């Protein structure tokens, strides 16, 4: 009888103490215990300044926890070096504000990781960039500078850049924040396609982790949820568990925004 | 991780904010002590940053050259070719204002025999390289701090790290190479232009000196050491101007409002570094 090999966790945090990017002496989350398995789609929600972005930067291996352990693809993030670059490139990261390079056009931004990592000329990378831009409906903006593009499209360009190297794990920092209804809907559908296995990526399912300031848009029985509140990371489970949870932080993240009266 | 580590290491070694913020009694000795301590920390930080940059230049010379070569070319163009019009003007002005008058004054007292050695000391060894370095610092160094400081404040460094791109390799190495080559080439053009226009000015003043005699004297006063030390000095100027400006723009996390303050500090330190390098080379000339 053949024994099935257990899948190692894609992200694993044990007692991790998460420090802020801007001030390493400031702890934003304590004792984080979290495990993300291949093919899972996690949504980590929390109010502003609860440490969502910092948690994601740690999960990407871009920051090392002040205490505890953080492993990405089974490797401690503190040990990520040049020799482990191949592992590092299995992770794609989309920043909340895109963080595109303003001196490059959208096409150049999207091409940069591929050209740098594979040492390709602009002409050699052209075809792959064209396909990806088309997939994300960015072709009309290929030669536009990021500063001249609406925020909705800049976010999409940042997603394209993160997908250029076909990562296995995609981390998205507040991807729905500030998007209009149409872009929001498109992005949710596109992320679902990535999670199930998009043909552009050879049908291989992708592991996704997204942060959010509002849980309602993410309602889906297949996703896993966690919440950040008061320096604590709590795993909620599936959407049914979220709805059953009576914690005030969860209620706030599920509440309709109050109507504003002029 | 090492990709992030290069900048993080430089920051750990250069985090002077802690000392700048610390409250001290208002005595002169304490203030002097703090200034001295900050000065030493800055030197330590710059040295660490220089070593890290040199390490990256050597270790990653063949990495992503299809991306890096155009970036290096762009920086050479920015710190060299595009400054040519300004340098032609400065060379003419330097020739007219300094050399022409020196030639004229020497001719009046019948000391034209000293012309060659005077020109070599004043223009080739001192004024040419130093003036070039200060002009490049003002024109390109300031832009470096502002560009990198803004990139740092807008999180572009984190974006590079997220893409597995070493920010030192991508942002700093092209600037260092471009500026080192730019200062070297511009100094040569400045010296040639100044010497040529200087003779022109003397000629217009009817100084009895033939061009052949003028250039022969200069050529005879030049030593092989002048060429070697001129090359080393100008490359050192370019390297350290790039380092100081990149260090201030990139090595420490910044907010947008910090950028202008940091630019002023970088230019001041850049001038100090150029003078210190110049002093080292004066000692070398004297010893050799």
Image: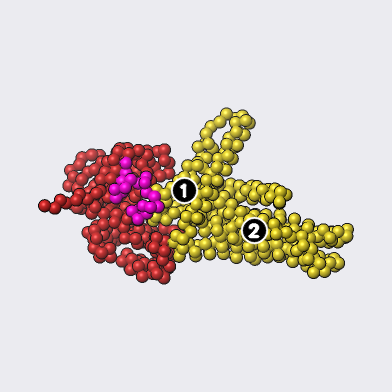
Chain colours: A red, B yellow
Q: Position of residue A204 (x, y in %)?
A: 24, 60
Q: Quadrant of residue A250?
A: top left
Which residue does the numbered mark 1 point to in the structure image?
B7
- The residue drawn where x is 41% and y is 70% is A123
Q: Are marks 2 and 1 on the same chain?
A: yes
Name the one closer to the observer, A88 or B155: A88
| Of the two numbered discs 2 and 1 in the rendering, the one whose residue sits closer to the viewer | 2
State which tag comes first along the sequence, 2 or 1.
Answer: 1
Residue range highlighted in magenta: A69-89
Which residue does the numbered mark 2 point to in the structure image?
B231
Q: Position of residue B280 (x, y in %)?
A: 66, 48
Q: Position of residue B159 (x, y in %)?
A: 41, 54
Q: Position of residue A150 (x, y in %)?
A: 39, 61
Name the one closer to the observer, B246 or B27: B246
**Residue A7 appearing in the image:** yes
Q: Is residue B69 left or right of residue B27?
A: left
Q: CA distance from mark 2 to mark 1?
A: 30 Å
Q: Height in image: B286 above or below A189?
A: above
The chain under label 2 reads B
Q: Is residue B105 left or right of residue B160?
A: right
Disc 1, SS: helix
Would you say residue B72 sits in the magenta stretch?
Answer: no
Disc 2, SS: helix
User: Decide: marks 2, 1 in contact (CB < 8 A)?
Assistant: no
Q: Quadrant of residue A92?
A: bottom left
- The residue drawn where x is 36% and y is 46% is A79
- The residue drawn where x is 62% and y is 59% is B183
């Amino acid at each position: 009888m053949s024994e099935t090999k257990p899948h190692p966790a894609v992200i694993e945090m044990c007692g991790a103490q998460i420090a802020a990017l801007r001030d390493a002496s400031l702890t934003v989350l304590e004792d984080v215990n979290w495990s993300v398995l291949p093919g899972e789609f996690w949504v980590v929600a929390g109010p502003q300044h609860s440490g969502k972005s910092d948690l994601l930067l740690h999960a990407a291996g871009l920051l090392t926890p002040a205490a505890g352990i953080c492993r990405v693809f089974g490797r401690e993030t503190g040990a990520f070096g040049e020799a482990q670059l191949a592992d590092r490139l299995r992770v794609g990261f989309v920043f909340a504000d895109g963080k595109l390079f303003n001196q490059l056009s959208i096409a150049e931004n999207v091409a940069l990781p591929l050209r740098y990592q594979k040492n390709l000329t602009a002409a050699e990378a052209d075809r792959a960039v064209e396909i990806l831009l088309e997939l994300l409906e960015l072709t009309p903006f290929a030669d536009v500078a990021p500063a001249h593009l609406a925020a909705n499209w800049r976010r999409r360009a940042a997603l394209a850049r993160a997908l250029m190297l076909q990562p296995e794990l995609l981390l998205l920092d507040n991807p729905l924040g500030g998007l209009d209804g149409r872009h929001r809907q498109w992005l949710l559908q596109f992320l679902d396609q990535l999670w199930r296995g998009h043909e552009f990526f050879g049908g291989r399912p992708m592991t996704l982790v997204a942060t959010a300031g509002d849980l309602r848009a993410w309602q889906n029985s297949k996703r896993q949820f966690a919440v950040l509140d008061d320096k604590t990371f709590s795993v909620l489970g599936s959407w049914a568990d979220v709805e059953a949870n009576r914690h005030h932080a969860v209620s706030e993240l599920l509440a309709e925004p109050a109507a504003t009266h002029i | 991780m090492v990709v992030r580590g290069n900048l993080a290491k430089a920051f750990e070694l250069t985090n002077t904010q802690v000392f700048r913020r610390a409250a001290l009694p208002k005595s002169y000795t304490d203030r002097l002590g703090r200034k001295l301590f900050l000065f030493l920390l800055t030197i330590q930080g710059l040295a660490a940053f220089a070593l890290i940059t040199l390490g990256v230049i050597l270790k990653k010379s063949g990495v992503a050259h299809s991306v890096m070569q155009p970036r290096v070319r762009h920086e050479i163009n920015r710190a060299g070719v595009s400054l040519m019009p300004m340098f032609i003007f400065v060379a003419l002005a330097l020739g007219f204002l300094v050399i022409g008058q020196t030639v004229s004054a020497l001719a009046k007292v019948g000391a034209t025999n000293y012309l060659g050695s005077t020109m070599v000391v004043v223009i080739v060894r001192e004024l040419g390289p130093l003036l070039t370095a200060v002009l490049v610092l003002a024109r390109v160094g300031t832009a470096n701090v502002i560009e990198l400081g803004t990139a740092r404040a807008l999180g572009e460094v984190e974006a590079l790290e997220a893409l597995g791109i070493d920010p030192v390799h991508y942002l700093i190495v092209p600037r260092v190479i471009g500026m080192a080559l730019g200062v070297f080439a511009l100094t040569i053009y400045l010296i040639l232009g100044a010497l040529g226009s200087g003779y022109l000015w003397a000629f217009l003043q009817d100084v009895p000196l033939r061009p052949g005699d003028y250039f022969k004297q200069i050529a005879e006063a030049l030593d092989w050491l002048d060429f070697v030390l001129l090359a080393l000095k100008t490359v050192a100027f370019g390297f350290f101007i790039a380092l100081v400006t990149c260090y201030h723009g990139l090595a420490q996390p910044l907010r947008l409002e910090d950028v202008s303050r940091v630019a002023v500090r970088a230019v001041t330190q850049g001038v100090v570094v150029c003078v210190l390098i110049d002093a080292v080379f004066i000692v070398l000339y004297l010893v050799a």
